[in-house]
Image (spheres, rainbow, N blue to C red):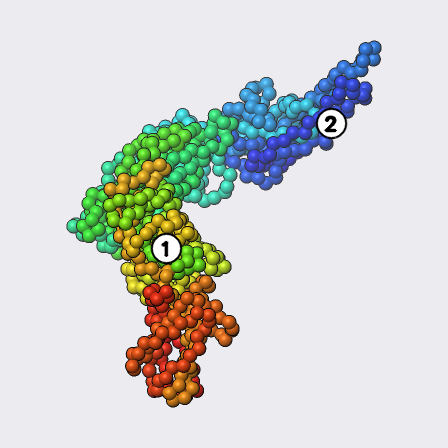
Amino acid sequence: MGVWIIVGVTMMAGLGVALGMYAAKKAAKTDMAPASLDDFNVTTAQEGAVVPVIYGRRRVSGNIIWYGNLEAVAHTQTAGGKGDESEVTVGYYYYLDVWQAICASRGGMQIVEYYVQDDKRTPSATTITLNDGSEPDFPSEPGEHANRIPDVAHVFFKRLYLGENVTFVPTIHYTVDAPLEDSPVNHAVMEKGLNPAAVIYDMLLQAGAGGTWINLDKFNEAADYWYERGYGINVELREQKEIKKHIAKVLEWVGGAFGVDEEDKFIIKAFDPSEEPFMELSDDNDDFLDFTITRKHWLDTHNFFRGSYIDENQLYSTRTVSCYNPANIRLVGRQIPLSVDLTCFRDVTTASKRLWEIMKHESFPGANLTFKTHMKCARLNVGHIVRINHSRYGLEGVDYWITRKDVSEIDRNELTFQAEQVTSKLFDDGYVDSGDPEWEPPDYQPQALLHQAIFELPYNSSFGRYPAFVLLAQRRTAYENGFVVLVSINGTDYTNLGTVGTFSQRGTLDEDYPSDTPAIDDEVGILYTPARNDPVFGTISREALFSTPRIAIIGNEIIGFQNVTPEGESSYRLTGCMRGIYNTPVETHGAGSVIWLTTLADNVVGEGEYTTFGQVVPGSNFYTKMLPKVGAKVLNPADATAIHTVKAYKAAKPWSPCRVEVYRQDYFTLHIRIWPTNQTKQGAGAVAAENQTDQEPFLWDTDTSFEIWDSVYGVHYWIIVPYGPYYGEYSMNGNFTLYMQPRREGQYLGEVISIDVGDEVGKSYIGPVA
């Protein structure tokens, strides 16, 4: 009895086993019946699946096309006590004939080993019969409908042991070796796989190309280079694609180019950085009809690399190698990872060597060229190295790989090329197995801050009326994990206040930022370029905009921001900008102005109990040094520049009134009503006068007085507002301007505001006017 399955191959199936239960020692004497063939499930049989093409050595799963001739051998145990002993069947050992398809036929294909439920077994002529697809033989057990399955490698197991008490035909995997021993390409068979040039040559033949269509000399040149590098590859093709896409994948693995020569024969070119330039071009010789150059930013490079490969010493499972460029990480300030497919390699040494080669190229911001030239360069092809001299761009003897050749304007005797800098020449050829770095990470020493500043905060609900200062520190690298703060009242004797962990980001505006944007600006935004994009500020919700203590500082204005969007090569635009935080003045900021982005956290020092270090900054002025630290290492104070700060006592200054109403009762009599700004409520600046309502009572600063004068007589009056909005009279005829300045504790002055008052009787004039 047998079961037929349509020929096909599937991906690796899941592994499992159904275990029959042994009878206990005191088991019943009833014997267990064996399973029939109909009771068995098939794990790997799929109609219409792709038959894989194998180059080199790969582990693949077989696809069952027939099974039958089930044999069950009883497993018995002695049961019962003394005088009542008997043999009881507690299970069965199962054997089965199995026929499986493996892969497309390759000349000389061999099975190195096979796995039944991950139990590795060595093939032998007594247990396994292999047909590599070229032989006429096929098993007779399936009966009259069996055939030799031409061009498909298949295997027949006679009496394959399945296990005890199993009810399925198990998954079988094969380590298949498919060499290209008859290839005319040099070094076709290598120690750890096949030469990439030989694989591409065979792919072309299988796609229908004739041998005369291929420039064998160019293939051998590439083959010699890859043989020297040890880049033997092992390929399993399961997708039906254009042949050029399969070739492109091979060249991506090992580094190379594919094209045609002047005789329209197929050629390949290995990217060998030690190769001499094919030709040299110079603007002095009028070689360029057009020329452009672009350079990557460091942030466009990668510095941490992981490569996946197949490890032949770990049952051909997928493993990972890694390497990194610590100099790039230190410069950029963060890891920029890149995952690389190296599954064509089956050993850690080859995978590591290739990953290091990729790392040295991808972690350096090389330049790319696009240039147009004349027919002098007709023989220049993809993969060639060209040496470029161009005085305008400061290029002298710089080597570039040709990556693209455009002949669409050849009727005008013009050719266009794209080229990429040969950065590999800047590095040695070293690598380390398993991706462990060749160099030890340096013993990083703290460096002086890239930029630093101190900003005195106005009154706010967090720090009150005490002088409070934000320490703005832009670190040079991402390795500094904080900075020590030293303070002195004379610039000589410093006191160590402790360590701050909050760094800030400094930049410059790329364009003007006007003062007439909405209080919450979602349209214009702030375009700026940071000195370093560190720390990184991301986008937050609109709700978080009103509660997250992160701010931008430009001039005297404090601005909250919601959205951070990259723009251009290295700039960012801040939108959702909440202007005039803490009632700071909304100003126009010109291009080139300095902008600081920071979070109010442990970087605020001052005299108040809520600041980081408490009452430690006495006097009207002080000196500060900020010393970056890496681990336990701290910058030498002699290497830090001190900042001299003179206190402006911004927090002690009263805010200007949020609303003033002047009502002209008659020609000479005015009624004045003043609402001092409530300093306990934060928002997008002070509430505009026209948005105030007549709600009573208003909240106000209860310790504020106002000095009032006019544009006509200039006589000053003092008005004290101890308990609420002020109501009073003022005598003045005609048109004039009324000025008002808040004063607190008799010494701290706020900003002067003004209200333009007309002569129309019965009209209210509302301010303040900015």
Locate residue 693 relative to residue 516 in the image: left or right: right
Circle 1 packing at 10 Å, graded few (<14), some (14-19), many (20+), is: many
In the image, residue 15 sits, relative to residue 257, either above or below, namely: above
Label 2 sits on a secondary structure element that is loop
Which residue sits furthest top? Answer: 83
Q: Nearer the viewer, residue 649 or 365?
A: 649
Label 1 sits on a secondary structure element that is strand
Q: Nearer the viewer, residue 151 or 38?
A: 38
In the image, residue 210 sits, relative to residue 592, either above or below, namely: above
Tell me residue 608's x, y (percent): 39, 53
Q: Quadrant of residue 500?
A: top left
Q: Nearer the viewer, residue 615 or 33?
A: 615
Q: Amino acid at mark 1?
A: Ala
Q: Quadrant of the N terminus?
A: top right
Residue at image x 33%, y 41%? Answer: 629
Task: Check disc 2 and report the residue beneath it.
Answer: 35
Locate residue 519 relative to residue 83 in the image: left or right: left
Task: Check disc 1 and report the residue beneath it.
Answer: 468
Q: Quadrant of the C terminus?
A: bottom left
Q: Quadrant of residue 666?
A: bottom left
* Residue contact between numbered discs 1 and 2, judged by CB atoms under 8 Å: no
First of labels 1, 2 by sequence position: 2
Tell me residue 528's x, y (percent): 33, 58
Tell me residue 97's x, y (percent): 65, 25
Which residue sits furthest right? Answer: 83
Q: Amino acid at mark 2?
A: Ala
Tell me residue 159's x, y (percent): 65, 22
Residue at image x 25%, y 49%? Answer: 490
